[in-house]
Every structure is written in structure tokens, then in C-alpha cells.
């Protein structure tokens, strides 16, 4: 065991290749790597992503919590954990996870604008959520793979929001996101 050390690049590339090709060996390679590099937040995050793609949401959440605990400054880990919690119906957990990233709707960082959008969604402010998420998609250059997942939420919001001249309340957040995981392909 090499506690405190990061997984070597060659092993990480093999793991990423297995994940990208949907190889059944992805989880096995991750598990083996975690036995050696248990303090590598990247490996825990990747394991969480694999588990989410397998619809093992409780396992995905635990792995992503570990990644955030090991590397709290890595915003993408926190954001993806919050998104997972939100889409699984754990609104208060998502709120707590996303809070450090949110509150910056005027930011030029797509991830922070996304987080502000998800917080607006948690507060049932669908119009603000839609605005922030669409703006975040325009700004997001660091994590372009997120635009697909956020686009699914944007589409649900557009369908749920009444026409501009009808200011009635839209459906609740849980209804809006109920089919998100069924449509999402990568996390």
C-alpha cells in the first residue's frame, strides 16, 4: 500500500481506457488500484462514476464522498456528487454538497454557474435554474462532457416551464428529475 501517493500515469491511463470502452474490467482495475493507492481521490471519483453508470447510486455516492473528502478543493468532484445526490432525490445532501460552489451566478466558470443553477432548482426557482444552467453550458469549457447531462435537465425545465406570459408554478424538482438517470449516459 502506498498511502498518500497517487496512482501512476500508466495505470490511470489503462483504467480510463477501460472506462471509455465500457470494459467489464474497469471496476476490477479500479478496485485493484485502490488497494495500492487508497488515498488517490481520482480513483475514488472514477469508481463513483463507474458505479453511477451501473446504477449503483448508493455505492457511487460513497465513492464520490470519499473523493471529495480526500480532495475538497477539486470542484468537479463536489459538483458531480451534488448532481448525483440531487438526481437521486437527496435534496438536502445535494444542497450541502453544492453550497460551497454555488452563489456565484455571475461567475465566468461554468461549474460554479451550474452549481448556482442546481441550487435554484433545489429552491424551486425554475426560471433562474434554467437561466443559470443555459449560461453555464455556454461558459463550460473545462468539463464539456457535463453539457450533455446538464442539457437533459435544461430540456426538462423548458418542457415544464409555462410560457413567459403565464407565471404559474411549474412541477416540483423531484418530478422534473425523475427521468434524468434513465436518459443520462455518462456522469
Image: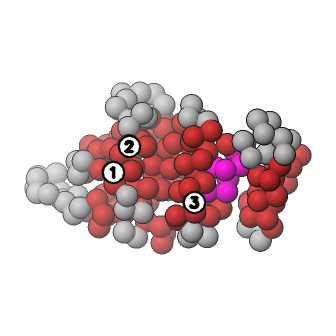
Q: Disc 3 to disc 2, how far (Cα)?
A: 17 Å
Image location (x, y in percent) of residue 71: 61, 36
> In x, y percent, where is residue 136?
43, 40
Q: Is residue 7 left or right of residue 114?
A: right
Does the image show residue 9?
Answer: no
> Which of pointers 3 and 2 lies earlier in the amino acid sequence?
3
Point 58% across, 63% down: residue:
59
Where is residue 165? Give x, y as percent: 11, 52
Kindly identify the residue that appears in the image at 37 percent across and 29 percent down.
104
> Eyeballing the image, is 46 above or below 3?
below
Q: CA distance from mark 1 to mark 2?
A: 6 Å
Give yes or no for contact between labels 3 and 2 (Cβ–Cβ under 8 Å).
Answer: no
Residue 43 painted magenta? yes
Q: Residues within 10 Å of mark 2 (few under 14, many from 20)?
A: few
Residue designated by label 1: 92
Q: Which residue is mark 3?
A: 60
Left or right of 124 on screen, residue 55: right
Q: Are marks 1 and 2 in contact (CB under 8 Å)?
A: yes
**Which residue range is magenta in the image?**
42-49
Majority secondary structure of magenta residues: helix
Secondary structure of the residue carrying tag 3 is helix
Q: Which mark is residue 96?
A: 2
Between 58 and 108, the one nearer to me in the picture: 58
Q: Which quadrant of the rendered structure holds the C terminus?
A: bottom right
- In whole angstroms, how far apart are the C-alphas of marks 1 and 3? 17 Å
Amino acid at each position: 500500500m502506498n498511502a498518500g501517493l497517487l496512482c501512476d500515469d500508466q495505470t490511470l491511463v489503462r483504467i480510463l481506457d477501460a472506462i471509455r470502452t465500457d470494459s467489464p474490467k474497469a471496476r476490477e482495475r479500479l478496485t485493484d488500484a485502490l488497494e495500492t493507492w487508497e488515498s488517490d481521490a481520482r480513483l475514488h471519483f472514477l469508481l463513483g462514476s463507474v458505479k453511477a453508470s451501473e446504477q449503483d447510486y448508493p455505492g457511487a455516492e460513497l465513492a464520490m464522498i470519499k473523493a471529495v473528502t480526500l480532495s475538497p478543493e477539486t470542484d468537479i468532484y463536489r459538483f458531480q456528487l451534488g448532481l448525483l445526490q440531487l438526481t437521486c432525490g437527496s435534496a438536502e445532501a445535494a444542497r450541502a454538497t453544492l453550497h460551497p460552489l454555488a452563489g456565484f451566478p455571475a461567475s465566468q466558470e461554468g461549474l460554479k454557474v451550474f452549481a448556482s443553477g442546481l441550487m435554484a432548482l433545489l429552491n424551486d426557482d425554475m426560471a433562474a435554474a434554467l437561466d443559470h444552467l443555459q449560461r453555464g453550458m455556454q461558459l463550460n469549457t473545462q468539463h464539456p462532457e457535463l453539457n450533455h447531462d446538464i442539457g437533459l435537465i435544461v430540456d426538462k425545465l423548458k418542457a415544464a416551464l409555462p410560457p413567459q406570459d403565464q407565471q404559474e408554478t411549474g412541477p416540483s424538482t423531484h418530478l422534473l428529475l425523475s427521468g434524468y438517470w434513465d436518459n443520462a449516459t455518462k456522469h
